[in-house]
Amino acid sequence: MQDVKDIKPHIVHFAEDEQILSTQDLSVFYGGTTQKLFEASLQFKKKTITALIGGSGSGKSTFLRCLNRMNDKIARIDGQIWYHGLDINAQNINVYELRKNIGMVFQKPNPFPKSIKDNITYALIANGEKDKHKLDQIVEESLRAAALWDEVKDKLNKSALALSGGQQQRLCIARALALKPEVLLLDEPASALDPVSTSKLEDTLKQLRSDYSMIMVTHNMQQASRISDYTAFFHLGHVLEYNTTENIFTNPQGKITEDYIRGSFG
Amino acid sequence: MHEVFLDELKKLNTRFMNMVIDVSEQIENATQAFIDHDKKAAQEIVKDDQKVSKMALKVEKRTLKLMALQQPVASDFRNVISILKAITDLERIGENAMSIAWETIRVKGNKRIPEVEDLIKQMSDRVTFMLDQVLKSFIQSDEKLARDVAAQDSQVDELYVKARKAIIAGIKEDPESAVASSSYFMVIRLLERIGDHVVNLAQWVVYKTSGELVDLNSSNDENVMNSL
């Protein structure tokens, strides 16, 4: 079988003014020598959903975590990540500021053990926001954007832990949206949810697409095909194919991509 | 899970291929009966005129089940979709072959035009050859062959135009042949339509193989209209 290093990847490119985020030769090393990601160069288009797919250990989550510096303490990251003309992989970047602009939603819903409202306002207050009226407004806007407002508007002071898993996950999205990010990173956001909650979450993400750019890791092929505009396929730390989701799922160019999405391996 | 899918897909492909072979035989037999003025043979053919529709329905059910339960993607998706679309054309081809057999039973008047019947035989040979070739292109996933088959439809169209002219000339020469000629017009039209459906099949082989959706029929049809 051909070595994965020798395979010529099929990668889509976007004009500079269409991009929200891009990486250049991004490599990740764990423990100094073990390379988990190999020179990934990807451009992400504004206001679209991009799905990152691939088997376990393919490097997709490692890649995602680099995009808001979540790998800082555990790995060495070479290469550049461009965001508004800045290399956000550089040492002098304020990571907290960065994460306001590039938010993250994790696999397992992780609300704070506080009220629904406090979950949303926590970071805002920590950032110095004191205007109660403004905070209330942001709570409502964020919950509406995450399609949770109607379900929780009468119990904003109740504990977030009393919500269902699907509601908790949408609360985590609302919490991220409260900081007015431009980009949302989602790491398998629906893998712990039942089909009804998954469907609601997917609807929410589709609605958010008009205002936000989203990059999502998923193991669920149907989910990737249902809601994403673009899909990148990772294999053994290499990006082998990146194209419109329609193309990836109806006419993939590479044999390994084809075999993976057809379920022949991985 | 993929093994289960591949097994189902194999069965689906086999059923589809058998259907192509059956339909090809129907065209051949129906046209032969027509040329031989063999009403008995024609009656045998129309005895089971629902055969192709029944087979198509079975294939459709299998395809829909595969789509719903296995949710195929990539080449698997293209394979299943191309069959789902192609069987509609196969069904039409089967219906047209039945109509040729019915014309054999209905035909009246003894005055025949041998030259026209020879052209009808040529048309039938051409479309059944195309059908066999399109089946080969499907099995071998041979896009080039599928496109070649589609290009051959222009020969069917030429024969159609030639036959029309021969029928009109025949009526002029011997007005008594006009009775049989209405059947001739019908049969050559049916064979010409079969050619178009075979081109549609070729289009689905192109899609299955390359993922490209193409229209290989439009230019051919224009040529026919211009020659009339």
Image: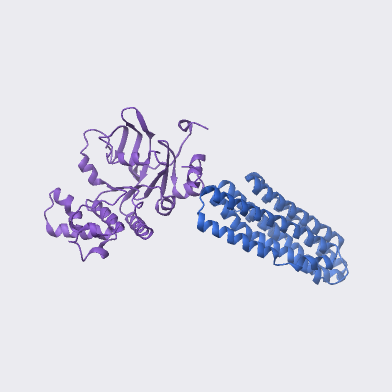
Chain colours: A purple, B blue
* Residue A245 visible in the picture: yes
* Percent position of residue B31, x then y: 79, 61
The residue lying at 35 percent from left, 35 percent from top is A24
Is residue B203 visible in the rendered image? The answer is: no
**Residue A183 relative to residue B126: left or right:** left
Which of the 4 image quadrants contains residue A80?
Answer: top left
* Observer-nearest of A132 and B181: A132
Counting labels gives: 0
Q: Quarter of the image for the C terminus of chain B: give it.
A: bottom right
Please provide percent x and percent y for residue A162.
24, 59
Q: Is residue B212 left or right of residue A161?
A: right
Q: Residue at horizontal 32%, vertical 55%?
A: A208
User: Observer-nearest residue: B44 or A130?
Assistant: B44
- Report the residue at 62% width, 63% height from top: B57
With A116 as the anchor, is B213 left or right in this view?
right
Query: Camera-side residue: A141 or A218?
Result: A218
Residue depicted at x 40% and y 54%: A227
